[in-house]
Image (cartoon, helix red, strand yellow):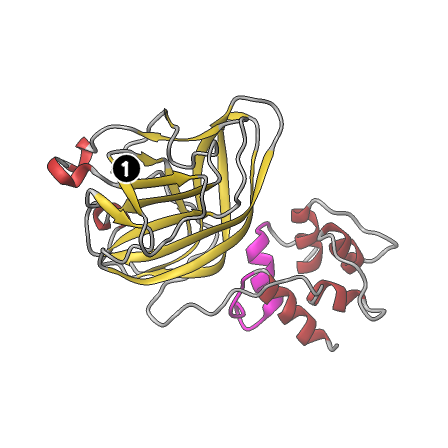
Amino acid sequence: MDNGIWIEEWAKSLGITEPVNGTWIEAIRQHYGGEDVNGTHLMTILNQMGGDISNGTMIEGIMNAMGRSIRNGSIPAGIGNSGDITIPPTPPVGCTDIQDVISNNYGNYGTTALYYMIYKLYNYNRTGWILLNEELGTEELQIRGIEFEYRKLSSGTVSFDNQKLYLGHIQENAFPSLVNLDLSNLNVSDLTLVWEGTADWEYGNPVNQTINFDNTFCYNGTDNIVILWVDDSGAYTYSTFNIRGNASVYLGYGLGGDDIYLSFRFYQDAVPNDETDTGTRYNYRPNTKLLY
């Protein structure tokens, strides 16, 4: 692996899509921040990682700080391509990729325990909520993840597999009285599976649940966004946790009447039929931040 290729692979494994000032190493240095140490980018990067020189080489120190290992007898190959790195897809044309930015909470911040958002006294759950265009703004942005709050007052951690998270654009400003679990009775476009896996719920009040997406989602700057959480674990727990959010009308946006129903929920022990089962709307919403 020649010098330029491994550095480029290293940069791309960090989500960097183009060089800076003509070099990939400068892009990496800016990614980690910090000023040049003795005129060397590598030492700057190593210091910003909190690593140190091992066996007298900077690149081995960087490899160790990254938790990577030698590949095919080569330290650069270990840094550049560890075999477990997913390079983010190139953003669609017109979708700004600003990276490493987390939004403020959308809407009014709330401290209410919303017991029925993901209700794990039951085996299966569907939870959806809407973020409004007036909250999101008009810039087309690449969404890389999401963060919301929950609380769990019993000690320890509970984990559930077979969890999925979808994002899509939605024309409606609120949910109707009954919501098809597949959202087929709503004007939803480009519903995208952005993450699937196991969700861990830890002790704390509150705790942030941060999900880094497997597939990024491009917000179009025009519509509202619908977020859909699908719990197909088929398991329950008495060690209950609950989502934390706002349980009142969103007065900050002058909402009233049917426009206050910014979320819906569904829970039961039997396996749901997403085409025929329906969820119930509510006038609450989780505290939500997006990662760009």
For the view shown, which residue lies furthest in the bottom direction? 2
Relative to the observer, which residue lies in front, 215 or 121? 121
* Residue 157 x %, y %: 61, 32
Are there few (<14), some (14-19), or many (20+) residues within 10 Å of tag 1? many
Q: Is residue 203 above or below residue 76?
A: above
Would you say residue 40 is visible in this rendering?
no
Q: From the image, tell me which residue sits under label 1.
A: 107
Q: Quarter of the image containing the N terminus?
A: bottom right
Q: Is residue 21 above or below residue 146?
A: below
* Residue 271 x %, y %: 45, 48
Q: Is residue 25 magenta?
A: yes
State the extent of the magenta-drawn residues as a range: 15-34
Q: Is residue 255 above or below residue 170?
A: above
**Measuring 28% from the left and 58% from the top, which residue is drawn there?**
169
- Badge 1 element: loop
Relative to the observer, which residue lies in front, 106 or 16? 106
* Residue 234 x %, y %: 52, 44
Q: Is residue 13 magenta?
A: no
